[in-house]
Amino acid sequence: MIRHTFPTYSMKAYEPGVGDLSAHKSDPGTCQLDMIDKNLSHHSSPPTITHGDKTAWSSYVRLTNAKTYGAGPIAQSNRANGGIRCNWGKTGSKHTEIFRLGGNSGRYLPTGSNYEIHSMGFEVYRKRTDSTSPTNNNAEQHCVFLKRWGIELISRTSNSTRFWSSPVLATTGELHNATVLGSGVYTYEFYNNKYNGFGSNFFENNYVIKAIWFNTAVKDGSFPGDATTEFEIFNMRFYQDFKGGSSNRRMVQPAMRNLSDRNKQMFG
């Protein structure tokens, strides 16, 4: 008799508090990891913003430098294993980049009112490599930072989409709580958002995650001087709510499948 073994995960709800990196890292096995593919593409603007902060994203002097490396940013607790990396070199003034992760395939949850992936978190590593100053004029005006991020959902049965955008996270490039290392200086930042921050009825079981979007930038304006920044996104995890699930109940992991198959039941 042939036996098949399928990966499973706990049905216990899990969601760290906003900014709680320790809880994010100590996930007890309930976070969902590779919910989307790691394809990265560059864009001139995000989708139409339907939820969250609806002000336009920065699109001046767009660059297309971001690339995935290693295993990509999904569930990498150590950035050496994978992530998204941007290295603009000497930035000068007034640059921005808009890129998307995913959009081709995903692990879409079974239909039903009790299953929901409802938020996510990730870390950002920023290092200034041309100076050990984290806060001087060049750091403020020319170091790359994460300005916005967002989640794009798509209906299981149609091409209808929803897009939540974060508020503006930063407008200048100083490296707060920074550590000097050799001839450079670096800092780690953590971003996550609780369910109620996405807006009323943004997540529901008829919609699944299509892609995650990012907007990196330097300070908006023309300034003298320069800075060189290494920028990486890693340790991405998706938080779940199975609405009544408990730690002693488990669920078979859905298969990674094409977006066109998002309403089909498939096992991993």
Image (tube, rainbow, N blue to C red):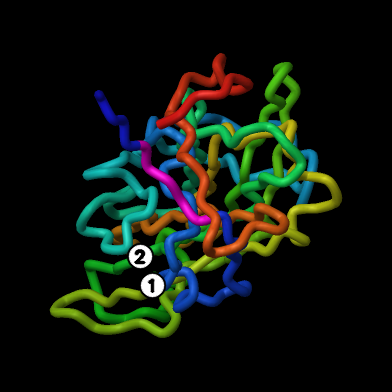
Q: What residue is rendered at 26% in x and 44% in y?
A: 71
Residue 136 drawn at (x, y percent): 40, 80
Where's the C terminus, which quadrant?
top left
**Residue at the farthest front position:** 1
Q: Nearer the viewer, residue 255 or 252?
A: 252
Q: Is residue 7 magenta?
A: yes
Q: Quadrant of residue 112?
A: top right
Task: Indicate the amino acid at tag 2.
Answer: Tyr
Residue 188, numbered label: 1
Q: Of callouts 2 and 1, which one flags the residue occurring earlier in the amino acid sequence? A: 2
Relative to 236, is 163 on the left or the right? right
Q: Which residues are magenta?
A: 6-10
Task: Indicate the amino acid at tag 1.
Answer: Tyr
- Asked if the residue at tag 1 contacts the one at tag 2, i.e. Cβ–Cβ closer than 8 Å, the answer is yes
Q: Is residue 42 magenta?
A: no
Q: Is residue 151 above or below residue 159?
A: below
Q: Is residue 142 visible?
A: no
Residue 59 drawn at (x, y percent): 58, 40
Q: Is residue 76 above or below residue 43?
A: below
Q: Quickly name the residue at label 2.
A: 125
